[in-house]
Image (cartoon, coloured by chain):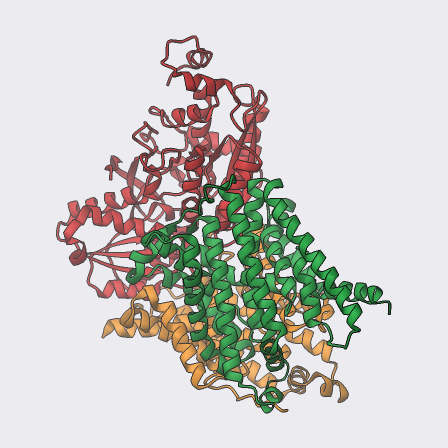
Amino acid sequence: MSGPPIGSARASGAAGPDAPAASRQRRAIAFALLLAGAAVLIASAFLLSPFRLFQLTLAAGYAVAILGLNLVTGYNGQISLGHGAFYAAGAYTTAILMTHFDWPFWATLPVAGLASGALGYAVGFPALRLGGFYLALTTFSLAVAVPQILKHRAIEDWTGGVQGLFIAKPDPPAFLPIEADQWLYLTTLAISAALFLAAWNLVRGRIGRAMRAIRDHPVAAEAMGMDLAAVKTRTFAAGAALTGLAGALGAVAVEFVAPDSFTVMLSITLFVGMVVGGAASIGGAVVGGLFIVFVPNLAESISKAAPGAIYGVLLILLLFVLPGGAAGIGRLAVARLWRRDGGR
Amino acid sequence: MPNRRSLIAAAAGVAAAPLSPWRRAEARSTTPGVTATEIRIGNTNAYSGPASAYAVISRCHAAFFRMVNEQGGIGGRQIVFLSYDDGYSPPRAVEQVRRLVEQDGVAFLFNTLGTPSNSAIVRYVNQRRVPHLFVASGADKWGDYRQTPWTIGWQPSYRTEAQVYAKHMLDRNPDARLALLYQNDDFGKDYIAGVRDVLGDRFDRVVRAASHEVTDATVDSQVISLQASGADALLTATTPKFAAQAIRKVHDIGWRPLHFLTSVSVSVASVMQPAGPEKGIGIITAAYNKDPTDPAWDNDPGMNEWRAFMRRHMPGADTTDINYVYAYGVALTLMQVLRQCGTDFSRQNIMRQATGLRDLEIPTLLPGIRINTAPDNYHPIRQMQLQRWDGTTWRRFGEVIEGTRV
Amino acid sequence: MEGFAHQLVAGIATGGIYASVALALVMIYQATHHVNFAQGEMATFSTYLAWAAVQGGAPWWAALLGTVFASFAVGVAIERVLLRPMRSAPVLAVVCAFIGLMLIFNSITGAIFGYAVRPFPSPFETSAPLLGGLVSGHALGSTAVTLAVLALVWAFFRHTGLGLAMRAAAYNPVSARLVGIRVGWMLALGWGLAAAIGAVAGVMVAPVVFLEPNMMLGVLLYAFAGALLGGIDNPAGAVAGGFLVGVVENLAGAYLVGAELKLTLALAIIVGVLLLRPSGLFGRAVESRV
């Protein structure tokens, strides 16, 4: 997991002029770290138990979902408590295409992204007129309504109603001597890496600056000639598409979708993951994904009497220590290291 | 009930039972989770989240197995009961069950809670051939021995129960019109399926249904709509809080239908008392467990056995909670299965014994109800008895009714 | 037609429940400019305290009074212990802390009091239902209590120096401090009052929906909707919004889309209204300065 945080540190670090040599050196270090991280992650596929791989696959999926939320909330300042809806849209798109039309998993991914992106675009429009808590609570109500919509009679034939749909995880190609769990882990890893790269590119470029400018100072951004509506709705669409893709990855890992998988708790969990990882941080999303998979288990191992309370206490303690999430401390550490490397 | 010595002999390969070679090999080779000294049993429950009310079932199991271990265990082995929280969320259920099966290496799963969670894991456990015993859900699908031969239910299915009500209604009044209040999930929808089984083509003419979500504040509006439909019978298929609301509202608006109530919500303390005991007079339900708050069982030997267990092993627990009675009954059923296994705790044999229960009597079940399973019968409890609320207690009437096979 | 009247009245009764919780949400918003996600679970916890007092033999009104004071103390304590250290934290972290608080209260309530559904006595119980079962004594009584609390809140914010100071502290902490308002204590006071109002709401809700740890799960969402609909900075608006949501939800479920989609439709209507009036029906438009 060492790749992305560095990227984010560079992306969000001050754009001070660097000496070309130091810059080249840093880029080399970053690249080497990235390679090492990738090697570790790929090697895990052959070192860890299938169960641990399954957990990491889940975490990778959640990380992408949090990334999508982060674009909207962290970078663009539109608080969404309803990203579970987009996650569900992606998951169901994949499940329906796989069960009713026998599509292979990989082919459903673009459709899942498009479908949830379109939904996000549609939600983005009303979001334009609502700010702050009004938007938060409107998206929250979307999340609450999702299960009810998913099991509605009119679409029951497609969604499987309350029973949900079973899907099978893809088999590895015949020439590879690996298990389905390993194959799915590697596939998910590759897809997540690609999506993280795409998001990183997006936020460090012109569009990313526009997104942040609108978050920090909408009036000034508009005065500078930015099209607020276009940036906001497209950010919503992009964020929703990412979260939808994550839903597709999660659905195939769990091999099952049902309305009960996408209750309002999912949206809340994604939100918690984003804040814990760090708002407006690409690498933070990875931490967030790991947090929401592993910390509930930690809470449970502490007390079975009230695991919810333990989870809540852990969460609040963490926020006390790191109000800016893991990314806050990560940025600080990386900045210190750079300074030492740069010889300043 | 086959006696214990003959089973032990059979497992040792002495008896003339037709043992296929692979099975004998299996019996000798190590079954995951079974050693010379212990048996590992896996379980999931909702320790957190909206269904936490059911967590007491697994707490009760843990206490029960502690008691078994104190008494020397089973087949010379101690029981290691591993129970994890799935928060009533299907993805987490999959994660926890994979942890149990792959990481902890349990021999089998026992009484995993909830229809959504079990739906999510049923395919996995059947692919892996892990016995998935006595699922804590009344969905009808756990009896599907052809599709999912490693999964078996325990309690009467909701669908069977609905059939019983629909038939009783038609017996009383062949032209009755039925209002159906159901929770909009698979629990509630099983009741629609059961009523449809009985009514067939007439369903659309005879039945007016209204659903509610678990997030609704009240079901008053639904009750009013159903009354306005002019129905003269009502089936309430919803969880305790909403059942209590429905009983009260039906009474307060002056509606006096022939009222059937799901067996899930018959607790005297959690439903009938909150609703107002006089408001539920005449309500009919079907039961299979003895209700701990029903004075009829105050001196019942079976319930005294349960009370003694609760006093010794779960001190301080709320003994008005019928979930403890349920848990005790399921755990006793499992003990019978394990006893029948003799010394052969292979997964095949566990499944064979779980589907080979004959007229097993459980002290917490209503008199006359026996547990029977067979390779083509994965519904351990098929019997229920109708009972009517008289303002203070449930009065059983009629025979123990056997549900039809769907 | 009789059915319609029933639906309407039932909607108003349910709306009263939403309104009472919405009022607590407005209170905390007025005082701190935050929306507290844990409000519902805190109210449930308070209601259990009242229940325990009544079980212990306390007279009903004494139990209510005691619970209101205890809840006030808990609210103040939460602000002092939990939110004070987070006052410079980003708003997202604060929202997240509310979520944590919600989980803690929900879990602890269940662990302490169990999950059994319990009846909660009402002081307004009548022997026979009024108007042929159209309304219950409790519905009338609790509506009166909600309106009384509303009047108190309104008077407090309009006509007392403390109320004015509280609004100032929430609206512009820096200027408020400059004119000598102790902003920190104003926030704590706001939390205490919101928790106290939540306790009243819980005690009014419990006899209707029955007491159990997830009692407020559904109510809170509708209360949010009501507060938004009416305007979260306007106590009277929020109460009106709560009643409106109850009525709209019932009528939509009964006559428009059926119960299967009544939640969805109710929310769609609210979002529709918000699109036309982004700060709620009775809220003040927020102007931003450059």
Horizontally, residue B44 falls left or right of residue A147, namely right
- Where is C29 relative to C138, above or below? below
Residue lying farthest to the right in this orientation: A344
User: Residue A211, relative to residue C178: is it above or below?
Assistant: above
The quadrant where residue A283 appears: bottom right
Counting from the top left corner in percent of width and height, residue B370 is at 33, 29
Q: Looking at the rendering, in which quadrant would you find the N terminus of chain A? A: bottom right
Q: Colour of chain B?
A: red
Q: Which chain is green?
A: A
Q: Residue B290 placed where, x, y %?
A: 39, 37
Residue found 33% across the figure and 39% down from its top: B156
Q: In this picture, is A86 found above or below B142?
A: below
How many marks the image carries: the answer is 0
Q: Nearer the viewer, residue B238 or C95?
A: C95
Q: In what quadrant of the picture does the C terminus of chain A appear?
A: bottom right
Residue closer to the observer: B398 or A176: A176
On the image, the x and y values in percent for residue B339 come to 46, 21
State left or right for residue B145 relative to residue A132: left
Residue B56 visible in this rendered orientation of the protein: no
Looking at the picture, how far across and down is residue A205, in whole percent?
A: 61, 75
Please, is residue B17 above or below residue B72 in the view?
above
x 33%, y 66%: residue: B221
Q: Residue at x 67, y 66 (%)?
A: A8
- Asked whether B400 or A311 is in front, the reply is A311
Q: Colour of chain C?
A: orange
What residue is shown at x 54% (from left), y 38% (from top)? Answer: B100
**Within the image, what quadrant is residue B227 found in?**
bottom left
Camera-side residue: A316 or B235? A316
One can see residue C235 in this view? yes
* Furthest residue in direction left, as rendered: B175
